[in-house]
Amino acid sequence: MQINITFRHLDSSPGLKEYVNKRISKLAKYFNGPVEANVILKAEKFRQQAEVSIVGDGFNINGKEETGDMYEAIDLVVAKLETQIKKLREKRKGRKKGTTKEFEVASIVAEEASEEGPEIEVERVFVKPMSVEEALEQIKTTGKDFLIFNNSETDSVSVLYKKGENRYVLVLPELS
């Protein structure tokens, strides 16, 4: 990780540089590949400000904190950046193309004259990303009546089911 430190209205001290390098370099564990961190430390009257911009690994993350103590401002901005990085990495994990999603499908088992209500059996289904044409081909080859899949054109979960000899229905979700 390359760290660039800029001092504005503040004397640079080796201790402050070392502290910034130590705190910012701890964020390197969240990245794969080269990362650049630009740190700006400002002093304005009684306010001490730390501003950090991290670029690399597909991320562009910024944080800014202001307190009465420069070391405290650095700690706060690093904590803020760490939270942002974790949140963005979790988002990125969920968006990977080509991965299958797992959904739970509830199917109602027929009641046997009980007043307690229907028994619900939970079945896990792996939803594969594919086009509508691929889903249609899969239904024809497997002989099943329906298929739940992740529509690669709309990036949403869809259902394709057979409704007759040579007729199929595509169910697309629509949020209200």
Image (cartoon, grey):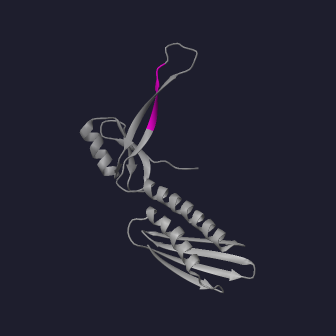
For the residue pair 64 and 167, the one nearer the viewer reads as 64
For the residue pair 54 and 3, the one nearer the viewer reads as 3
| Quadrant in the picture for residue 103 | top left
For the residue pair 49 and 150, the one nearer the viewer reads as 49
For the residue pair 117 and 48, the one nearer the viewer reads as 48
| Residue 130 sits above or below residue 82 on the image | above
Query: Residue sitting at 57 percent across and 66 percent down?
Result: 78
Q: Is residue 70 left or right of residue 166?
A: right
- Residue 170 is at least partly visible in this image: no
Across and down, in percent, residue 18 comes to 53, 75
Find the magenta span and give its range.
104-110
Q: Is residue 162 left or right of residue 65?
A: left
| Residue 117 sits above or below residue 105 on the image | above
- Residue 145 is at least partly visible in this image: yes
Query: Residue sitting at 49 percent across and 65 percent down?
Result: 27
Task: Work out which quarter of the rendered image holds the N terminus and state it.
Answer: bottom left
